């Protein structure tokens, strides 16, 4: 039951979300994992190594990096980094393109995609850390 106000100039407050929407927010919060900068840097190093990872490992690293890149995108957009830093805006645009791309069919294309994702993720992490828009980075 909603509270009833007797004062005519005080509007009745209504919650911004209904119960189902709040439950959805709670589910997303429970499944959230913080950005792990160490793991991201390890994946970037492996992806950009002179010797590309084996096919199965490359697929796992690509999936992790795409998830980490999505987290970095969220951070950059929430902090409005691209409005104050042109390089971040460029990285955000490229990250969006890379996260929308479908999986590549040929092995050489998959390695190229992995390295592009790794490079953009590493650069975006470095730039956000330099701008102090990440709480902690190892």
Image (cartoon, helix red, strand yellow):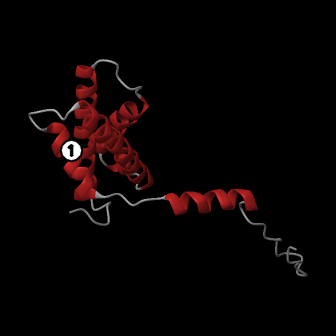
Q: Identify the residue shown where x is 28% and y is 28%.
A: 113
Q: Answer whether residue 127 is visible to the viewer in this image.
A: no
Which is nearer the eye, 138 or 79?
138
Q: Position of residue 137 (x, y in %)?
A: 24, 62
Q: Position of residue 32 (x, y in %)?
A: 47, 59
Quadrant containing the C terminus is bottom left
Residue lying furthest top in this view? 106
Residue 60 vertical position relative to residue 101 in the rendered view, above or below: below
Q: Is residue 77 left or right of 112 when viewed as pictured?
A: right
Q: Identify the residue shown where x is 34% and y is 22%.
A: 104
Q: Position of residue 114 (x, y in %)?
A: 26, 33
Residue 117 vertical position relative to residue 39 in the rendered view, above or below: above
Quadrant containing the N terminus is bottom right
Q: Position of residue 69 (x, y in %)?
A: 35, 44
Q: Identify the residue shown where x is 54% and y is 62%.
A: 29
Residue corresponding to mark 1: 44
Tell me which corner region of the image, top left, top right, bottom left or bottom right, holds residue 3.
Answer: bottom right
Q: Could you say whether the residue bearing mark 1 is in a helix, strand or loop? A: helix
Which is nearer the eye, 122 or 60?
60
Q: Residues within 10 Å of mark 1 (few under 14, many from 20)?
A: many
Residue 16 vertical position relative to residue 48 in the rendered view, above or below: below
Q: Answer whether residue 120 is visible to the viewer in this image.
A: yes
């Amino acid at each position: 039951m909603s509270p009833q106000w007797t004062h005519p100039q005080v509007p009745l407050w209504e919650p911004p979300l209904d119960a189902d929407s709040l439950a959805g927010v709670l589910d997303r919060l429970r499944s959230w994992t913080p950005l792990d900068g160490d793991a991201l840097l390890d994946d970037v190093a492996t992806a950009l190594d002179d010797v590309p990872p084996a096919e199965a490992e490359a697929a796992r690293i690509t999936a992790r990096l795409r998830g980490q890149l999505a987290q970095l995108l969220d951070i950059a957009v929430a902090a409005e980094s691209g409005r104050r830093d042109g390089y971040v805006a460029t990285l955000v645009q490229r990250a969006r393109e890379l996260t929308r791309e479908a999986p590549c069919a040929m092995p050489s294309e998959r390695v190229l995609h992995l390295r592009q994702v790794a490079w953009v993720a590493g650069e975006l992490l470095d730039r956000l850390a330099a701008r102090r828009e990440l709480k902690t980075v190892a």
